[in-house]
Image (cartoon, rainbow, N blue to C red):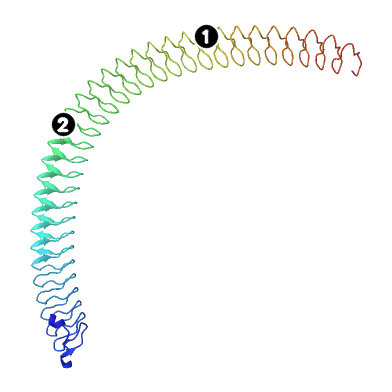
């Protein structure tokens, strides 16, 4: 070949050389080819380059000796060695057609993913496995001596039974929604199998039948469980309750959860020992200690009903704002004050020893008399339209009080009696006024 490609020597005659893309070769030795000249006695046309005609046949990828090549999509292989395949040629003695590539016909059978020796393969969606070893399965082949069909993959038939999640040896498995378990060991359950010697059906999963009874949340040994909404508890230990089971020796029904029957009575918020609780809206308190109240329980020895909360009965009386010890409180609009200290008043309580009712608020009874504007000490006030004035000092007048020693009634206001006489416009000192129609 070096001689073929070597340029003609400078002294070779023009009658002996022809032009070629690669260089000059003796005209007696070269034929045209796309890639370069090869001696005409040695070359045939090929897409990729010339090969001696005694040695080449046409192929898409390049020439191979005709004694050695057959057409193939990927390249030529000796005809004695190749058969057509989509991915490339393999010796015909060795290849059969397959989608992914050729494998010796003595060794391959058709499969979607690639060929495997026919003595070794059977068709499967994921790839071939020796026919002596494989059976069809959705996920891949397993030896037929070893596999049975299952949705997730094959397992040896001697070892597998059909199950939704995968196969398990038939000697070991029974059908279950979540997966197989040995038939000697499993019974059907929604969540998975458990040995039949060990399991009973339950919504959440199986537990040994010797150990389980049905419950909504899961199984517990039958010797140990009774049905309850939240889960099982040993029957020797549980009674039904809305929130969960508690040992029957220990529980009574309650809305929030169980408490030992020896210890609990029903209450809206939760159980408290019966020896200790009485019903109350907010929660239980020991019966020896509680009475019903709107805000919560207080020991019965200590509480009486009140709008805001309980106070010991020895200490509280009802009041609008909250309880005060009965020894200390009387009802008042604004809040309680000790009964020994308060009388009712519109604005709030004042000690009864100190207050009398008045429109504006309480004043000590020893100090106040009723007046339109507010209380003034009774020793000091008399009623007047504008406000109270000390009774020793005021007489009633339209404009306000004036000391009784100083005022007489007049339309405009009071004037000292020593100084005023009645007139249409108002009082004028009696020393200064006489009656007239105009004033």
Which residue is denoted by mark 2 in the rendering? 198
Q: Nearer the viewer, residue 10 or 164?
A: 10
Q: Is residue 73 above or below residue 255?
A: below
Label 2 and label 1: CA atoms lie apart by: 70 Å
Tally of numbered discs: 2
Q: Is residue 198 above or below residue 7?
A: above
Residue 285 position (above or below residue 169): above
**Residue under label 1:** 328
Mark 1 is surrounded, within 10 Å at the Cα level, by few (under 14), some (14 to 19) or many (20 or more) other residues, namely some
Residue that appears at 20% across and 44% down: 165
Q: Quadrant of the N terminus?
A: bottom left
Residue at figure coordinates x 45%, y 16% from the top left: 293
Foreground pick, 345 / 259: 345
Return the x and y of residue 17 as percentages of the image width and height. 17, 89
- In percent of the image, x 17 and y 79: which residue is there? 50
Q: Residue at x 25, y 34 (%)?
A: 204
């Amino acid at each position: 070949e070096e001689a073929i490609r070597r340029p003609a020597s400078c002294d070779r005659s023009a009658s002996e050389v022809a032009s070629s893309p690669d260089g000059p070769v003796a005209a007696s030795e070269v034929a045209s080819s796309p890639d370069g000249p090869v001696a005409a006695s040695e070359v045939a046309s090929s897409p990729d380059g010339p090969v001696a005609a005694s040695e080449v046949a046409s192929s898409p990828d390049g020439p191979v000796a005709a004694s050695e090549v057959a057409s193939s999509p990927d390249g030529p292989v000796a005809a004695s060695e190749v058969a057509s395949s989509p991915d490339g040629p393999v010796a015909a003695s060795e290849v059969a057609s397959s989608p992914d590539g050729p494998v010796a016909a003595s060794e391959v059978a058709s499969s979607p993913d690639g060929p495997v020796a026919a003595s070794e393969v059977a068709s499967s969606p994921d790839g071939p496995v020796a026919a002596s070893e494989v059976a069809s399965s959705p996920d891949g082949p397993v030896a037929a001596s070893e596999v049975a069909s299952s949705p997730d993959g094959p397992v040896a038939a001697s070892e597998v039974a059909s199950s939704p999640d995968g196969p398990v040896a038939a000697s070991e498995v029974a059908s279950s929604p979540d997966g197989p378990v040995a038939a000697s060991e499993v019974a059907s359950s929604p969540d998975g199998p458990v040995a039949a010697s060990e399991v009973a059906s339950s919504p959440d999963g199986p537990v040994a039948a010797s150990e389980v009874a049905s419950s909504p949340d899961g199984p517990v040994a039958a010797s140990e469980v009774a049905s309850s909404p939240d889960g099982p508890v040993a029957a020797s230990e549980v009674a039904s309750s809305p929130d969960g089971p508690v040992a029957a020796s220990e529980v009574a029904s309650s809305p929030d959860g169980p408490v030992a029957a020896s210890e609990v009575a029903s209450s809206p918020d939760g159980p408290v020992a019966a020896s200790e609780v009485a019903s109350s809206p907010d929660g239980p308190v020991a019966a020896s200690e509680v009475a019903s109240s709107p805000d919560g329980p207080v020991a019965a020895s200590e509480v009486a009903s009140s709008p805001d909360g309980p106070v010991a009965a020895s200490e509280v009386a009802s009041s609008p704002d909250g309880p005060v010890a009965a020894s200390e409180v009387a009802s008042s609009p604004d809040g309680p004050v000790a009964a020994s200290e308060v009388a009712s008043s519109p604005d709030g309580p004042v000690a009864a020893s100190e207050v009398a009712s008045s429109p504006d608020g309480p004043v000590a009874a020893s100090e106040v008399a009723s007046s339109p504007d507010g209380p003034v000490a009774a020793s000091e006030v008399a009623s007047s339209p504008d406000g109270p004035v000390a009774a020793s000092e005021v007489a009633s007048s339209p404009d306000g009080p004036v000391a009784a020693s100083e005022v007489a009634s007049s339309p405009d206001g009071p004037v000292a009696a020593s100084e005023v006489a009645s007139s249409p416009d108002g009082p004028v000192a009696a020393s200064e006024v006489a009656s007239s129609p105009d004033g």
